[in-house]
Amino acid sequence: MKTKLKELKTRLTEINDLESAAALLDWDQNTYMPPGGAPARARQTATLERLAHEKFTDAGIGKLLDDLRPYEESAPYDSDEASLIRVTRRDYERAIKVPPAFVAEFSDHRSASFQAWAEARPANDFAKVRPYLEKTLDLSRRLANFFPGYEHIADPLIDYADYGMKASTVRATFAELREQLVPIVQAITAQPPADDACLRQTFPEAQQWAFGLEVVKRLGYDFERGRQDKAPHPFTTEFSIGDVRITTRVKENNLGEALFGTMHESGHGMYEQGVRTDLEGTPLAGGTSSGVHESQSRLWENVVGRSRGFWRFFYPRLQDIFPDQLEDVELETFYRAINKVERSLIRTDADEVTYNLHILLRFDFELRLLEGDLTVRDLPDAWRERFSADMGIIPPDDRDGVLQDIHWYAGGIGGAFQGYTLGNILSAQFFEQATQAHPEIESEIEAGKFSTLHNWLKESIYQHGRKYTPSELVERVTGGPLNIEPYIRYLCDKYGELYGL
Ligand code: ZN
Protein backbone atom coordinates (compact mmCIF):
# COMPACT_ATOMS: atom_id res chain seq x y z
CA MET A 1 0.00 0.00 0.00
CA LYS A 2 2.80 2.41 0.91
CA THR A 3 4.42 1.75 -2.49
CA LYS A 4 1.17 2.38 -4.32
CA LEU A 5 0.55 5.58 -2.37
CA LYS A 6 4.06 6.71 -3.23
CA GLU A 7 3.48 5.97 -6.90
CA LEU A 8 0.22 7.93 -6.81
CA LYS A 9 1.98 10.90 -5.23
CA THR A 10 4.82 10.77 -7.77
CA ARG A 11 2.36 10.80 -10.66
CA LEU A 12 0.27 13.58 -9.10
CA THR A 13 3.34 15.74 -8.51
CA GLU A 14 4.37 15.36 -12.14
CA ILE A 15 0.88 16.47 -13.22
CA ASN A 16 1.07 19.36 -10.76
CA ASP A 17 4.40 20.38 -12.35
CA LEU A 18 2.76 20.59 -15.78
CA GLU A 19 -0.15 22.58 -14.35
CA SER A 20 2.23 24.94 -12.55
CA ALA A 21 4.18 25.48 -15.78
CA ALA A 22 0.90 26.32 -17.54
CA ALA A 23 0.03 28.72 -14.71
CA LEU A 24 3.42 30.39 -15.05
CA LEU A 25 2.87 30.88 -18.80
CA ASP A 26 -0.52 32.34 -17.96
CA TRP A 27 0.94 34.68 -15.34
CA ASP A 28 3.50 35.86 -17.89
CA GLN A 29 0.80 36.36 -20.51
CA ASN A 30 -1.09 38.63 -18.13
CA THR A 31 1.89 40.63 -16.90
CA TYR A 32 4.91 40.93 -19.19
CA MET A 33 4.36 39.09 -22.49
CA PRO A 34 4.49 41.32 -25.59
CA PRO A 35 1.26 41.18 -27.67
CA GLY A 36 3.07 39.28 -30.44
CA GLY A 37 3.39 36.30 -28.12
CA ALA A 38 -0.34 35.69 -27.89
CA PRO A 39 -0.97 33.11 -30.66
CA ALA A 40 1.94 30.83 -29.73
CA ARG A 41 1.24 31.25 -26.02
CA ALA A 42 -2.32 30.02 -26.43
CA ARG A 43 -0.99 26.90 -28.12
CA GLN A 44 1.75 26.37 -25.53
CA THR A 45 -0.64 26.64 -22.61
CA ALA A 46 -3.08 24.30 -24.34
CA THR A 47 -0.31 21.73 -24.87
CA LEU A 48 0.65 21.73 -21.20
CA GLU A 49 -2.97 21.53 -20.10
CA ARG A 50 -3.60 18.66 -22.51
CA LEU A 51 -0.58 16.74 -21.22
CA ALA A 52 -1.66 17.28 -17.61
CA HIS A 53 -5.20 16.14 -18.44
CA GLU A 54 -3.96 13.05 -20.30
CA LYS A 55 -1.68 12.05 -17.47
CA PHE A 56 -4.38 12.62 -14.86
CA THR A 57 -7.07 10.67 -16.71
CA ASP A 58 -4.69 7.76 -17.40
CA ALA A 59 -6.24 4.43 -16.44
CA GLY A 60 -3.20 3.83 -14.23
CA ILE A 61 -4.40 6.55 -11.86
CA GLY A 62 -7.84 4.92 -11.68
CA LYS A 63 -6.23 1.56 -10.93
CA LEU A 64 -4.10 3.06 -8.13
CA LEU A 65 -7.17 4.75 -6.63
CA ASP A 66 -9.05 1.43 -6.70
CA ASP A 67 -6.14 -0.44 -5.16
CA LEU A 68 -5.83 2.18 -2.43
CA ARG A 69 -9.48 2.02 -1.38
CA PRO A 70 -8.83 -0.32 1.61
CA TYR A 71 -6.00 1.96 2.73
CA GLU A 72 -8.27 4.99 2.51
CA GLU A 73 -10.99 3.24 4.53
CA SER A 74 -8.59 2.21 7.28
CA ALA A 75 -6.99 5.66 7.69
CA PRO A 76 -8.70 8.51 9.61
CA TYR A 77 -10.96 10.63 7.36
CA ASP A 78 -8.91 13.78 7.81
CA SER A 79 -5.46 12.17 7.58
CA ASP A 80 -3.31 13.45 4.71
CA GLU A 81 -3.35 10.01 3.09
CA ALA A 82 -7.12 9.36 3.17
CA SER A 83 -7.80 12.96 2.13
CA LEU A 84 -5.38 12.71 -0.79
CA ILE A 85 -7.01 9.54 -2.09
CA ARG A 86 -10.55 10.86 -1.53
CA VAL A 87 -10.03 14.26 -3.17
CA THR A 88 -7.98 12.80 -6.03
CA ARG A 89 -10.74 10.27 -6.71
CA ARG A 90 -13.33 13.05 -6.80
CA ASP A 91 -11.20 15.03 -9.29
CA TYR A 92 -10.41 11.89 -11.29
CA GLU A 93 -14.01 10.81 -11.64
CA ARG A 94 -14.89 14.28 -12.83
CA ALA A 95 -11.93 14.49 -15.23
CA ILE A 96 -12.46 11.14 -16.97
CA LYS A 97 -15.97 12.18 -17.97
CA VAL A 98 -14.61 14.97 -20.20
CA PRO A 99 -12.88 13.84 -23.43
CA PRO A 100 -9.39 15.33 -24.02
CA ALA A 101 -10.44 16.63 -27.45
CA PHE A 102 -13.20 18.64 -25.77
CA VAL A 103 -10.79 20.04 -23.16
CA ALA A 104 -8.48 21.20 -25.97
CA GLU A 105 -11.34 22.66 -28.00
CA PHE A 106 -12.63 24.65 -25.01
CA SER A 107 -9.13 25.84 -24.14
CA ASP A 108 -8.45 27.07 -27.71
CA HIS A 109 -11.82 28.74 -27.80
CA ARG A 110 -11.25 30.54 -24.49
CA SER A 111 -8.02 32.06 -25.78
CA ALA A 112 -9.61 33.18 -29.04
CA SER A 113 -12.64 34.57 -27.23
CA PHE A 114 -10.47 36.47 -24.76
CA GLN A 115 -8.55 38.13 -27.63
CA ALA A 116 -11.80 39.11 -29.36
CA TRP A 117 -13.20 40.53 -26.11
CA ALA A 118 -9.99 42.49 -25.41
CA GLU A 119 -10.63 44.35 -28.69
CA ALA A 120 -14.42 44.46 -28.52
CA ARG A 121 -14.76 45.96 -25.07
CA PRO A 122 -12.86 49.23 -25.68
CA ALA A 123 -14.63 49.48 -29.06
CA ASN A 124 -18.01 48.92 -27.35
CA ASP A 125 -18.70 46.29 -29.99
CA PHE A 126 -20.79 43.44 -28.57
CA ALA A 127 -21.55 42.13 -32.08
CA LYS A 128 -17.87 41.33 -32.49
CA VAL A 129 -17.80 38.91 -29.55
CA ARG A 130 -21.34 37.59 -29.93
CA PRO A 131 -20.37 34.53 -32.03
CA TYR A 132 -17.64 33.71 -29.51
CA LEU A 133 -20.05 34.00 -26.61
CA GLU A 134 -22.59 31.84 -28.43
CA LYS A 135 -19.94 29.18 -28.84
CA THR A 136 -18.96 29.55 -25.17
CA LEU A 137 -22.56 28.92 -24.19
CA ASP A 138 -22.69 25.88 -26.42
CA LEU A 139 -19.41 24.53 -24.99
CA SER A 140 -20.59 25.23 -21.42
CA ARG A 141 -23.77 23.24 -22.04
CA ARG A 142 -21.76 20.41 -23.59
CA LEU A 143 -19.46 20.41 -20.59
CA ALA A 144 -22.43 20.18 -18.20
CA ASN A 145 -23.89 17.34 -20.24
CA PHE A 146 -20.84 15.16 -19.61
CA PHE A 147 -22.37 14.92 -16.11
CA PRO A 148 -25.90 13.67 -16.71
CA GLY A 149 -28.35 13.28 -13.87
CA TYR A 150 -28.16 16.87 -12.69
CA GLU A 151 -31.12 18.74 -11.29
CA HIS A 152 -30.24 21.97 -13.13
CA ILE A 153 -27.87 22.21 -16.10
CA ALA A 154 -25.75 24.74 -14.18
CA ASP A 155 -25.16 22.31 -11.29
CA PRO A 156 -22.08 20.51 -12.68
CA LEU A 157 -20.56 23.92 -13.58
CA ILE A 158 -21.27 25.42 -10.15
CA ASP A 159 -19.86 22.25 -8.64
CA TYR A 160 -16.50 22.85 -10.39
CA ALA A 161 -16.08 26.15 -8.57
CA ASP A 162 -18.01 25.56 -5.36
CA TYR A 163 -18.08 21.84 -4.75
CA GLY A 164 -21.36 20.56 -3.37
CA MET A 165 -23.38 23.67 -4.30
CA LYS A 166 -26.35 23.54 -6.64
CA ALA A 167 -28.34 26.14 -8.58
CA SER A 168 -31.32 25.53 -6.28
CA THR A 169 -29.41 26.06 -3.01
CA VAL A 170 -27.51 29.09 -4.29
CA ARG A 171 -30.73 30.54 -5.68
CA ALA A 172 -32.47 30.12 -2.31
CA THR A 173 -29.56 31.73 -0.39
CA PHE A 174 -29.41 34.60 -2.87
CA ALA A 175 -33.18 35.18 -2.72
CA GLU A 176 -32.97 35.44 1.07
CA LEU A 177 -30.01 37.80 0.78
CA ARG A 178 -31.73 39.94 -1.81
CA GLU A 179 -34.77 40.36 0.40
CA GLN A 180 -32.63 41.75 3.24
CA LEU A 181 -30.20 43.67 1.04
CA VAL A 182 -32.58 45.71 -1.12
CA PRO A 183 -34.09 47.71 1.81
CA ILE A 184 -30.58 48.44 3.13
CA VAL A 185 -29.46 49.72 -0.28
CA GLN A 186 -32.63 51.79 -0.60
CA ALA A 187 -32.26 53.34 2.86
CA ILE A 188 -28.62 54.28 2.22
CA THR A 189 -29.03 55.61 -1.30
CA ALA A 190 -32.02 57.73 -0.23
CA GLN A 191 -29.49 59.85 1.68
CA PRO A 192 -26.94 62.25 0.21
CA PRO A 193 -23.89 60.25 -0.95
CA ALA A 194 -20.63 60.36 0.99
CA ASP A 195 -18.01 62.70 -0.44
CA ASP A 196 -15.08 60.70 -1.82
CA ALA A 197 -13.27 63.60 -3.52
CA CYS A 198 -10.28 63.02 -1.21
CA LEU A 199 -9.59 59.71 -2.99
CA ARG A 200 -9.76 61.27 -6.43
CA GLN A 201 -6.78 63.59 -6.30
CA THR A 202 -3.46 62.74 -7.95
CA PHE A 203 -1.49 60.08 -6.10
CA PRO A 204 1.83 59.19 -7.79
CA GLU A 205 2.13 55.53 -8.67
CA ALA A 206 5.44 54.81 -6.94
CA GLN A 207 4.15 55.89 -3.49
CA GLN A 208 0.87 54.04 -3.95
CA TRP A 209 2.80 50.91 -4.84
CA ALA A 210 5.11 51.21 -1.83
CA PHE A 211 2.24 51.84 0.59
CA GLY A 212 0.30 48.83 -0.71
CA LEU A 213 3.32 46.58 -0.17
CA GLU A 214 3.82 47.96 3.34
CA VAL A 215 0.19 47.21 4.23
CA VAL A 216 0.05 43.64 2.94
CA LYS A 217 3.43 42.81 4.46
CA ARG A 218 1.94 43.78 7.82
CA LEU A 219 -1.19 41.71 7.18
CA GLY A 220 1.10 38.71 6.77
CA TYR A 221 1.54 38.20 3.01
CA ASP A 222 5.04 36.69 2.72
CA PHE A 223 7.28 38.32 0.11
CA GLU A 224 9.90 35.60 0.54
CA ARG A 225 7.28 33.32 -1.00
CA GLY A 226 5.56 35.77 -3.28
CA ARG A 227 5.78 38.97 -5.28
CA GLN A 228 3.53 41.61 -6.76
CA ASP A 229 3.42 42.76 -10.39
CA LYS A 230 1.13 44.94 -12.46
CA ALA A 231 -1.69 43.39 -14.47
CA PRO A 232 -4.64 44.94 -16.30
CA HIS A 233 -7.02 42.48 -14.58
CA PRO A 234 -5.55 41.72 -11.15
CA PHE A 235 -5.39 38.08 -10.07
CA THR A 236 -3.47 35.74 -7.77
CA THR A 237 -1.70 32.62 -8.97
CA GLU A 238 0.52 29.97 -7.39
CA PHE A 239 3.22 27.73 -8.77
CA SER A 240 3.95 26.10 -5.39
CA ILE A 241 3.20 26.87 -1.74
CA GLY A 242 6.54 28.70 -1.77
CA ASP A 243 5.68 30.88 -4.79
CA VAL A 244 2.28 32.55 -4.64
CA ARG A 245 2.08 35.75 -6.71
CA ILE A 246 -0.31 38.66 -6.59
CA THR A 247 -0.96 41.40 -9.14
CA THR A 248 -2.52 44.82 -8.97
CA ARG A 249 -3.34 47.84 -11.12
CA VAL A 250 -2.68 51.43 -10.15
CA LYS A 251 -4.71 54.49 -11.07
CA GLU A 252 -3.08 57.78 -10.17
CA ASN A 253 -6.45 59.52 -9.92
CA ASN A 254 -8.05 56.87 -7.69
CA LEU A 255 -6.34 55.93 -4.45
CA GLY A 256 -8.70 53.06 -3.71
CA GLU A 257 -8.00 51.02 -6.83
CA ALA A 258 -4.52 49.69 -6.05
CA LEU A 259 -4.86 49.89 -2.28
CA PHE A 260 -7.95 47.71 -1.88
CA GLY A 261 -7.05 45.58 -4.90
CA THR A 262 -3.69 44.76 -3.32
CA MET A 263 -5.32 43.85 0.01
CA HIS A 264 -7.88 41.74 -1.85
CA GLU A 265 -5.29 39.72 -3.76
CA SER A 266 -3.11 39.39 -0.65
CA GLY A 267 -6.07 37.63 1.03
CA HIS A 268 -6.13 35.08 -1.80
CA GLY A 269 -2.34 34.86 -1.57
CA MET A 270 -2.20 34.32 2.20
CA TYR A 271 -4.70 31.48 1.85
CA GLU A 272 -2.44 29.69 -0.68
CA GLN A 273 0.73 30.49 1.28
CA GLY A 274 -0.88 29.10 4.43
CA VAL A 275 -1.47 25.58 3.11
CA ARG A 276 0.63 23.02 5.03
CA THR A 277 3.81 22.30 3.08
CA ASP A 278 3.24 18.52 3.48
CA LEU A 279 0.49 18.90 0.89
CA GLU A 280 2.85 20.46 -1.70
CA GLY A 281 2.53 19.19 -5.25
CA THR A 282 -0.72 17.28 -4.61
CA PRO A 283 -4.35 18.08 -5.44
CA LEU A 284 -4.78 19.03 -1.76
CA ALA A 285 -2.56 22.11 -2.11
CA GLY A 286 -4.87 25.03 -2.86
CA GLY A 287 -8.11 26.65 -1.77
CA THR A 288 -11.16 24.47 -1.29
CA SER A 289 -13.63 26.48 -3.40
CA SER A 290 -14.08 29.81 -5.10
CA GLY A 291 -16.47 30.95 -2.33
CA VAL A 292 -14.07 30.13 0.50
CA HIS A 293 -11.21 31.69 -1.48
CA GLU A 294 -13.20 34.84 -1.99
CA SER A 295 -14.12 34.91 1.70
CA GLN A 296 -10.43 35.46 2.42
CA SER A 297 -9.89 38.24 -0.11
CA ARG A 298 -13.06 39.96 1.13
CA LEU A 299 -12.22 39.50 4.77
CA TRP A 300 -8.89 41.27 4.39
CA GLU A 301 -10.05 43.85 1.85
CA ASN A 302 -13.39 44.81 3.41
CA VAL A 303 -14.00 43.50 6.90
CA VAL A 304 -10.47 44.43 8.01
CA GLY A 305 -9.25 46.87 5.33
CA ARG A 306 -12.30 49.14 5.29
CA SER A 307 -12.77 49.22 9.05
CA ARG A 308 -12.31 52.34 11.17
CA GLY A 309 -9.89 50.55 13.51
CA PHE A 310 -7.60 49.58 10.65
CA TRP A 311 -7.36 53.18 9.49
CA ARG A 312 -6.80 54.55 13.01
CA PHE A 313 -3.46 52.82 12.62
CA PHE A 314 -2.70 53.28 8.93
CA TYR A 315 -4.19 56.70 8.17
CA PRO A 316 -1.43 58.78 9.84
CA ARG A 317 1.08 56.76 7.81
CA LEU A 318 -0.87 57.39 4.60
CA GLN A 319 -1.01 61.12 5.44
CA ASP A 320 2.79 61.10 5.84
CA ILE A 321 3.18 59.64 2.36
CA PHE A 322 0.67 61.98 0.74
CA PRO A 323 0.82 65.20 2.83
CA ASP A 324 -0.29 67.51 0.01
CA GLN A 325 -3.35 65.40 -0.71
CA LEU A 326 -4.42 64.23 2.76
CA GLU A 327 -2.98 66.52 5.43
CA ASP A 328 -6.24 68.43 5.75
CA VAL A 329 -8.54 65.43 5.34
CA GLU A 330 -9.90 64.08 8.64
CA LEU A 331 -9.79 60.34 9.34
CA GLU A 332 -13.58 60.30 9.52
CA THR A 333 -13.89 61.91 6.08
CA PHE A 334 -11.49 59.35 4.66
CA TYR A 335 -13.34 56.48 6.39
CA ARG A 336 -16.66 57.62 4.92
CA ALA A 337 -15.06 58.02 1.49
CA ILE A 338 -13.71 54.45 1.38
CA ASN A 339 -17.14 53.18 2.44
CA LYS A 340 -19.21 55.27 0.07
CA VAL A 341 -22.32 53.40 -1.06
CA GLU A 342 -23.80 54.24 -4.43
CA ARG A 343 -25.59 52.56 -7.28
CA SER A 344 -22.88 52.19 -9.91
CA LEU A 345 -22.23 50.60 -13.29
CA ILE A 346 -19.10 48.55 -12.73
CA ARG A 347 -19.07 45.47 -10.53
CA THR A 348 -15.38 45.67 -9.63
CA ASP A 349 -15.76 49.30 -8.50
CA ALA A 350 -18.91 48.62 -6.49
CA ASP A 351 -19.04 49.12 -2.72
CA GLU A 352 -19.59 46.12 -0.49
CA VAL A 353 -23.33 46.80 -0.05
CA THR A 354 -24.40 47.07 -3.70
CA TYR A 355 -21.75 44.62 -4.95
CA ASN A 356 -23.95 41.59 -4.38
CA LEU A 357 -26.72 43.00 -6.58
CA HIS A 358 -24.23 42.90 -9.47
CA ILE A 359 -23.51 39.25 -8.72
CA LEU A 360 -27.15 38.25 -8.31
CA LEU A 361 -27.88 39.64 -11.78
CA ARG A 362 -25.01 37.70 -13.37
CA PHE A 363 -25.87 34.49 -11.54
CA ASP A 364 -29.50 34.66 -12.71
CA PHE A 365 -28.38 35.36 -16.29
CA GLU A 366 -26.03 32.38 -16.28
CA LEU A 367 -28.91 30.13 -15.26
CA ARG A 368 -31.24 31.62 -17.87
CA LEU A 369 -28.65 31.39 -20.66
CA LEU A 370 -27.94 27.75 -19.84
CA GLU A 371 -31.66 26.97 -19.56
CA GLY A 372 -32.19 28.51 -23.00
CA ASP A 373 -34.62 31.03 -21.54
CA LEU A 374 -32.33 33.88 -22.65
CA THR A 375 -30.30 34.03 -25.88
CA VAL A 376 -26.90 35.65 -26.31
CA ARG A 377 -28.49 37.92 -28.93
CA ASP A 378 -30.96 39.26 -26.36
CA LEU A 379 -28.39 39.51 -23.58
CA PRO A 380 -27.41 43.21 -23.93
CA ASP A 381 -31.06 44.34 -23.81
CA ALA A 382 -31.87 42.00 -20.95
CA TRP A 383 -28.83 43.36 -19.12
CA ARG A 384 -29.93 46.98 -19.52
CA GLU A 385 -33.46 46.18 -18.42
CA ARG A 386 -32.54 44.20 -15.32
CA PHE A 387 -29.73 46.58 -14.40
CA SER A 388 -31.96 49.62 -14.49
CA ALA A 389 -34.62 47.79 -12.45
CA ASP A 390 -32.07 46.76 -9.79
CA MET A 391 -29.81 49.80 -9.71
CA GLY A 392 -31.99 52.60 -10.97
CA ILE A 393 -29.45 53.54 -13.64
CA ILE A 394 -29.29 52.52 -17.29
CA PRO A 395 -25.86 51.52 -18.63
CA PRO A 396 -25.02 54.01 -21.41
CA ASP A 397 -23.27 51.34 -23.50
CA ASP A 398 -22.29 47.66 -23.58
CA ARG A 399 -18.70 48.44 -22.65
CA ASP A 400 -19.84 49.28 -19.11
CA GLY A 401 -22.70 46.82 -19.33
CA VAL A 402 -22.59 43.27 -20.58
CA LEU A 403 -18.97 43.53 -21.82
CA GLN A 404 -17.45 44.63 -18.51
CA ASP A 405 -16.44 41.29 -16.97
CA ILE A 406 -13.71 39.05 -18.35
CA HIS A 407 -15.34 35.85 -16.97
CA TRP A 408 -17.71 34.78 -19.75
CA TYR A 409 -15.25 35.87 -22.45
CA ALA A 410 -12.19 34.06 -21.09
CA GLY A 411 -13.98 31.21 -19.35
CA GLY A 412 -17.32 29.47 -19.38
CA ILE A 413 -20.91 30.41 -18.61
CA GLY A 414 -22.13 28.83 -15.38
CA GLY A 415 -20.48 28.81 -11.97
CA ALA A 416 -18.43 31.93 -12.72
CA PHE A 417 -19.96 34.41 -10.28
CA GLN A 418 -21.72 32.87 -7.27
CA GLY A 419 -18.39 32.48 -5.42
CA TYR A 420 -18.07 36.26 -4.97
CA THR A 421 -21.27 36.60 -3.00
CA LEU A 422 -20.77 33.31 -1.16
CA GLY A 423 -17.38 34.77 -0.24
CA ASN A 424 -18.93 37.97 1.11
CA ILE A 425 -21.32 35.95 3.24
CA LEU A 426 -18.55 33.69 4.53
CA SER A 427 -16.12 36.55 5.21
CA ALA A 428 -18.46 37.89 7.91
CA GLN A 429 -19.29 34.42 9.21
CA PHE A 430 -15.60 33.53 9.63
CA PHE A 431 -14.64 36.92 11.08
CA GLU A 432 -17.43 36.73 13.65
CA GLN A 433 -16.13 33.33 14.67
CA ALA A 434 -12.53 34.58 14.89
CA THR A 435 -13.45 37.54 17.12
CA GLN A 436 -15.58 35.34 19.36
CA ALA A 437 -12.58 33.05 19.86
CA HIS A 438 -10.18 36.01 20.24
CA PRO A 439 -11.93 39.23 21.30
CA GLU A 440 -8.56 41.02 21.26
CA ILE A 441 -8.50 40.90 17.44
CA GLU A 442 -10.37 44.21 17.11
CA SER A 443 -7.95 46.12 19.36
CA GLU A 444 -4.97 44.47 17.68
CA ILE A 445 -6.18 45.71 14.30
CA GLU A 446 -6.21 49.26 15.72
CA ALA A 447 -2.58 48.71 16.73
CA GLY A 448 -1.62 47.46 13.27
CA LYS A 449 -1.24 43.88 14.48
CA PHE A 450 -2.80 41.07 12.52
CA SER A 451 -1.04 37.95 13.74
CA THR A 452 -3.84 36.62 16.00
CA LEU A 453 -6.36 36.87 13.18
CA HIS A 454 -3.93 35.57 10.56
CA ASN A 455 -2.92 32.62 12.76
CA TRP A 456 -6.54 31.78 13.51
CA LEU A 457 -7.31 31.74 9.78
CA LYS A 458 -4.22 29.67 9.05
CA GLU A 459 -5.10 27.21 11.78
CA SER A 460 -8.83 26.98 10.98
CA ILE A 461 -8.84 27.31 7.19
CA TYR A 462 -5.60 27.81 5.27
CA GLN A 463 -3.52 24.85 6.47
CA HIS A 464 -6.11 22.29 5.33
CA GLY A 465 -5.97 23.22 1.65
CA ARG A 466 -8.60 21.14 -0.15
CA LYS A 467 -8.82 18.46 2.53
CA TYR A 468 -12.35 19.45 3.51
CA THR A 469 -15.23 20.29 1.19
CA PRO A 470 -16.52 23.86 1.55
CA SER A 471 -19.51 22.73 3.62
CA GLU A 472 -17.36 20.51 5.86
CA LEU A 473 -14.99 23.42 6.41
CA VAL A 474 -17.76 25.91 7.23
CA GLU A 475 -19.29 23.40 9.64
CA ARG A 476 -15.93 22.73 11.35
CA VAL A 477 -15.05 26.41 11.65
CA THR A 478 -18.42 27.92 12.58
CA GLY A 479 -20.31 24.93 13.98
CA GLY A 480 -23.09 25.32 11.42
CA PRO A 481 -23.83 25.68 7.71
CA LEU A 482 -23.35 28.77 5.52
CA ASN A 483 -25.55 31.46 7.04
CA ILE A 484 -26.30 34.99 5.80
CA GLU A 485 -27.11 36.40 9.27
CA PRO A 486 -23.55 37.37 10.32
CA TYR A 487 -23.11 39.19 6.99
CA ILE A 488 -26.40 41.07 7.36
CA ARG A 489 -25.44 41.92 10.97
CA TYR A 490 -22.07 43.17 9.77
CA LEU A 491 -23.64 45.40 7.10
CA CYS A 492 -26.35 46.73 9.43
CA ASP A 493 -23.88 47.52 12.24
CA LYS A 494 -21.34 49.20 10.00
CA TYR A 495 -23.62 51.09 7.62
CA GLY A 496 -26.30 51.68 10.26
CA GLU A 497 -23.74 53.67 12.21
CA LEU A 498 -22.31 55.38 9.10
CA TYR A 499 -25.67 56.46 7.70
CA GLY A 500 -27.62 56.75 10.96
CA LEU A 501 -30.17 54.13 9.92
ZN1 ZN B 1 -10.99 37.65 -5.53
Image (cartoon, helix red, strand yellow):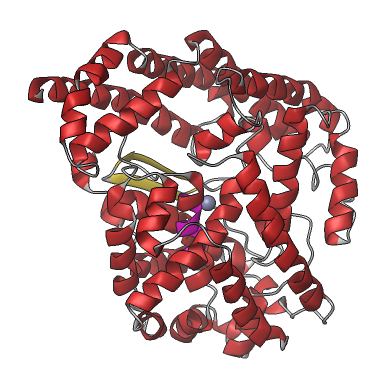
In the rendered structure, the answer to whether residue 135 lies left or right of residue 75 reads right
Give the residue drawn at x 46%, y 44%: 289
- Classify 379 as above or below 475: above
Q: How many numbered marks are there?
A: 0
Give the residue drawn at x 89%, y 55%: 388
- Which quadrant, please, contains the C terminus? bottom right
Res. 329 visible in picture: no
Most foreground residue, 117 or 203 = 117
Q: Where residue 24 appears, x then y in whole percent?
A: 39, 33
Q: Where residue 487 appears, x then y in whole percent?
A: 57, 68
In the rendered structure, the answer to whether residue 473 lies left or right of residue 346 reads left
Q: Is residue 183 magenta?
A: no
Query: Farthest residue toward the left?
Result: 2
In the rendered structure, the answer to whether residue 235 lies left or right of residue 400 reads left
Q: Does the magenta stretch include residue 294?
A: yes
Most foreground residue, 76 or 301 = 76
Q: Where residue 249 appears, x then y in whole percent?
A: 56, 53
Res. 272 visible in picture: yes
Give the residue drawn at x 60%, y 67%: 256
Q: Where residue 441 appears, x then y in whole percent?
A: 36, 79
- Which quadrant, please, contains the N terminus? top left
Q: Which span of residues is magenta-colored?
A: 293-300
Characterize the magenta stretch by its predominant secondary structure. Answer: helix
- Classify 160 as above or below 470: above
Most foreground residue, 483 or 161 = 483
